[in-house]
Image: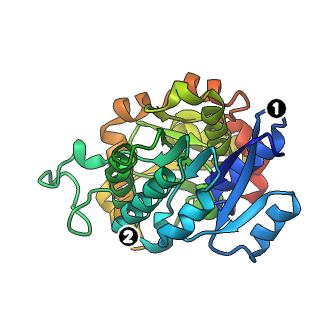
Amino acid sequence: MADKKIIAVVGATGAQGGGLIRAILNDKESGFTARALTRTPNSDKAKALATLGVEVVAADLDNPESVKEAFDGAYGAFCVTNFWEHFSAEKEVAQARNMAQAAKQADVRHAVWSTLDDTRKKVPLSDNRMPTLMGKYKVPHFDGKGEADPLFTQAGVPTTFLLTSFYWDNMIYFGMGPKKGPDGKLAITMPMGDKKLPGIAAEDIGKCALGIFRKGKEYIGKTVGIAGEHLTGAQMAAAMTKALGKEVRYNNVLPEVYRSFGFPGADDLGNMFQYKRDFEQDFCGARDLKVSRSLNPALQTFDQWLAQNKGRIPVE
């Protein structure tokens, strides 16, 4: 253990951070060991990591000193924020600033910042094709992360900017799985038209991040986008029909209809899907499947993910 480089993992009990920790644990040849950062080291998930031999430390992204202490002695840091915990892009920017400054103070040699596109670069606030949200965003859970990118560079932290994709796991946890319509038929609903949606198994994000840490200097200063596949809504529905043994249709709605659904974040997600639809070529192009597989040779396709997870998808 002593000769292994420490990767401090933010969000260690979450989807991305947890995936990275498991990737490190399962790769005995990587030369890395994981340090799990969590606000709640006494939680069941944190205790489970400790049982596996992972160093678990308390850190709060709103408390920069706690992050700096948790980063001390680490070679690398995996930095991520969770918009859906608080619905505040400003909070994400502040937390990213705290992580960037802590990484600099702790002399972290390689940070991987899990980020997303700042959609305002293509859809300025004056563009009315989609509504402006919270006064200054088009897709808040994208824009805050993208806005925070320069903070790592300005702090002088050697950083790789990791552009993630739609989690297929949203079908399990985020209410995006098949639902029965008035006609009793199952359907997935997205305002994507016939455009392709880059998607990925959440677990594979951590594996790709480990691939970036393994490659080291080659990826410092670069933006890397990852996805498991680029699929249309119709292709996703066909794959789910085959996996579930029940017909699943693709319900293509207009973005304004999706925004009107009324669940928390519906306007944000409606804008997100519209952005991905309207800028399909750029969005998919930034998430190269060959690059993703070079970082993570075990990268799953949607069919492979469904084979493993079909029993966990609630069918309403």
Q: Determine the secondary structure under disc 2.
A: loop
Name the residue: 42% across, 31% down. Answer: 286
Where, quadrant-wise, is the C terminus in this rendering? bottom right
Where, quadrant-wise, is the N terminus in this rendering? top right
Q: Determine the secondary structure under disc 1.
A: loop
**Which sits in the foreground, 196 or 235?**
196
Crowd band around label 1 with a 10 angstrom C-alpha radius: few (<14), some (14–19), many (20+): few
Measuring from the top left, give residue 237's x and y in whole percent: 58, 44
List the residue tagged with mark 1. 29
List the residue tagged with mark 2. 88
The answer to whether 30 is drawn above or below residue 93 in the figure is above
Q: Earlier in the sequence, mark 2 or mark 1?
A: 1
Name the residue: 60% across, 44% down. Answer: 76
**Which sits in the foreground, 242 or 145?**
145
Q: Quadrant of residue 285?
A: top left
Measuring from the top left, give residue 288's x and y in whole percent: 50, 27
Measuring from the top left, give residue 209's x and y in whole percent: 61, 40
Outermost residue toward the left in this view: 126
